[in-house]
Image (cartoon, grey):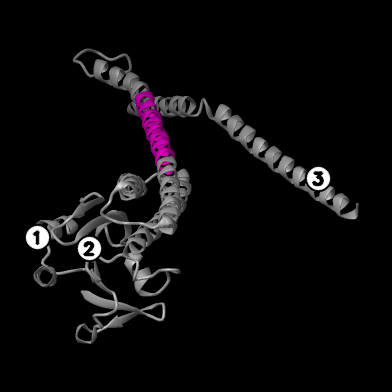
Amino acid sequence: MITYWQQIDGLFTKTKKEEIDSKIPLWIDARNVTRDETNELQNEYQLDQDHILDILDPDELSRLEDGEDYILTIVRVPIYDPSAETPYFTGPIGIIIKGNVIITICWTDSEVLKDFGANRVKNIKLTDFPSFIVQILNRANLNFLRYLKEINRRSTSIQNEMRLEIENQEIMQMLSLEKSLVYFTTSLKSNSLLLMKMKNTRLIKFDDEDLDFVEGVTIDNRQAIEMADTYSSILFGVMDAYSSVISNNLNIVMKKLAIINLVMMAPTFVTSFFGMNFKLPFDNMPGYWAVIMATVLCIISVLICWWLLNINKDNIAAIKNAKRMSRKQRKNIRSETNRLKKQERRLNRTK
C-alpha cells in the first residue's frame, strides 16, 4: 500500500496523489507493497530495478549507496509478528531521496513507520531529509530496546515454567527467542556500520546539530548491541543448563531401569534353569507350594527394587530441607536489612 504524506503545521497529513502540493516536501510511504506498486514507483521516479529488489530482500544488510540521481539508504528495523514462527525478527527499510521527495519502501508492515505516520515522533522536519533518516534509525533503536526487554521477560516466564516441567514446546520457544536475539544482534551491528559511514560520507550532508544527533543515535545503538549480546549469552547459558538437566534426568531413568533389569535377572535365571528337562526338587510337593514359592519370590523382588530405588531418598530430602532453610535465612536477612534501613531513614529525618 502506498501512502502520501506532507507535513502541515508540524504534523504529517495524509494526502491524495492528485492533491499533492509540489512546493512542499513529500514523503511516500510504501509498506506491504505488491509488484504492481513497486513497478509504479520504479517507472514514475526512474528507480533502478536492482535497488528495488535489494530493498525487498528480507536478508539485505544496511548500507548507503548513490544512485543515478537519487541516494539510497537501507536500514534494518525490528519487526514483531505474533503469528510467525519467530515472532521477533528484523527487516530492511529502503529510504530513497530524490529531489523534493523521500520514499520509504518496506516489504512488510513496520512499527517504526507507523510511529511517523501517527505523529508519535517529536521534533521531526520533513524539510531536512538527512535528519529524517537519522530519526528512523533512532526510532529503530528504541524499538530494538523495547523488544529486547520483552524477549527477556518472555524468557524469564518460560524458565519459570520449565522449572516445574520441561516440555518440548517450551524448549522450542526458547530456541525461537535465541534466534530472535541473533537476528537483532546482526541487524544492530549492520546499522552501526551504516552510522559510521553516514558520518564519513559526502553523499548526505549533515549540519552540526544533525552530527550531534547522529552521535547520540550511535550511543543508543551500542547500548542495544550490548544488551542483545548480554541477553543472548544468558539465554545460551540457560539452554545449556537445561540440556544438562535433561541429560541428568535421562541418566536417572536409565539407572532405575538398569536396577529393575538386574533384580529381574535372578528370577529369570532360576526359571530358565529349572525349565530344562530334569527332575526338580519340589516335584513331590503339592501344586499350591509352587504358587506360594512364586509369590514369595515376586514379593522379594519387589521389595529389593523398592529398596534400591529409594535408597537415596533421605539424602535428597536432606538437600531439599537445606535449600528451604537457606531460602528462609535469606528472607530473614533481607527483612532485617530492610528494617534497619527504615530505622536509619527515620533517624536521619528526625535529625
Q: Amino acid at mark 1?
A: Gln
Q: Residue 164: within the magenta?
A: no
Judge depth for marks 1 and 2 and give the one in front: 2
Instruction: Answer few, some or many: residues within 10 Å of disc 1's Cα (few below 14, many 20 plus, some between 14 and 19).
Output: few
Q: Quadrant of the N terminus?
A: bottom left
In percent of width and height, residue 46 lies at 10, 67
- Any part of residue 301 in sight: yes
Kindly identify which residue carries mark 1: 49
Would you say the residues marked 3 and 1 are in contact, meaning their CB atoms lie under 8 Å apart? no
Q: Position of residue 91 (x, y in %)?
A: 26, 56
For disc 3, the marked residue is: 340
Q: Position of residue 269 (x, y in %)?
A: 29, 18
How far across and how far down the image is residue 185, in percent?
34, 45
Query: Three-letter amino acid code at disc 2?
Result: Ile
Occupied quadrant, residue 112? bottom left
Residue wearing tag 2: 96
In percent of the image, x 26 and y 16: which residue is there?
Answer: 274
What is the span of residues highlighted in magenta in the rendered image?
A: 231-260
Residue 98 placement, left or right of 205: left
Mark 1 lies on a secondary structure that is helix
Instruction: State the SS at label 2.
Output: strand
The kind of secondary structure element at disc 3 is helix
Of badges 3 and 1, nearer the viewer stands 1
Q: Nearer the viewer, residue 259 or 330?
A: 330
Residue depicted at 25% across the width and 77% down the height: 4
Q: Is 350 situated left or right of 336 in this image?
A: right
Bin the neighbour count of mark 2 within 10 Å (Cα to Cα): few under 14, some 14-19, many 20 and up.
Answer: many
Residue sitting at 21 percent across and 59 percent down? 71
Is residue 332 shown left or right of residue 18?
right
Residues under labels 2 and 3: Cα distance?
62 Å
The dominant secondary structure in magenta is helix
